[in-house]
Amino acid sequence: MILPSKHLPEDRALITVGSRILLQLESPRSVSEVWEQLRAPSPSEEEHGNLTFDWFTLAISFLFAIRAIEMLDDGLIATLGTIKEGPR
């Protein structure tokens, strides 16, 4: 499920979906915005129309679990360390 296998194609593995999500997070974005960007066809890559919202949320959860992304106070998600915090 996390890695591709004999029964799970590379484009469906959570590590692959997660990497595509991380590419969308150059700046903090809402979950809905990332979902819409991920579903939009890109001329440089093949159509990813078979990605369901369930699989997308699993990938988001996976990224939270490995501390690759974080939820900001304003409800946006960002890669860990994107926003430099001041002294606490």
Image: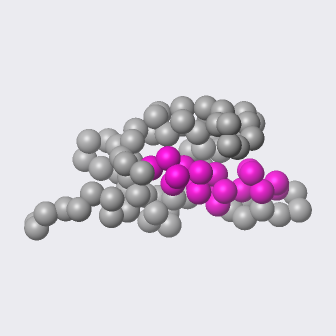
Give whichever of 19, 66 is nearer the camera.
19
Q: Is residue 20 magenta?
A: yes
Position of the N terminus, as image quadrant, is bottom right
Toward the front, the furthest residue is 44
Report the residue at 82% width, 56% height from top: 8
Tell me where residue 87 sits by quadrant.
bottom left
* Residue 42, image x, y percentages: 64, 37
Q: Please give left or right for residue 62 compared with residue 79 in the image.
A: right
Q: What residue is rendered at 39% in x and 42% in y?
A: 29
Image quarter where the C terminus lies is bottom left
The single residue placed furthest to the right in the displayed view is 6
Could you tell me if residue 51 is visible in this image? no
Picture quadrant of residue 6: bottom right
Residue 76 in magenta stretch:
no
Q: Which residues are magenta?
A: 8-25
Q: In this image, 87 relative to 22: left or right? A: left
Predominant SS of the magenta segment = helix
Residue, x 61% and y 32% (percent of image)? 40
In the rendered structure, the answer to whether residue 42 lies left or right of residue 73 reads: right
How far across and how far down the image is residue 14, in percent? 66, 56
Way the structure is coloured = one colour
Residue visible at 51% across and 58% down in the picture: 63
29 to 85, vertically: above or below: above
Q: Which x, y percent locates residue 69?
A: 43, 58
Q: Is residue 79 visible?
A: yes
Residue 52 x, y percent position in the rendering: 67, 36
Q: Is residue 27 left or right of residue 46?
A: left
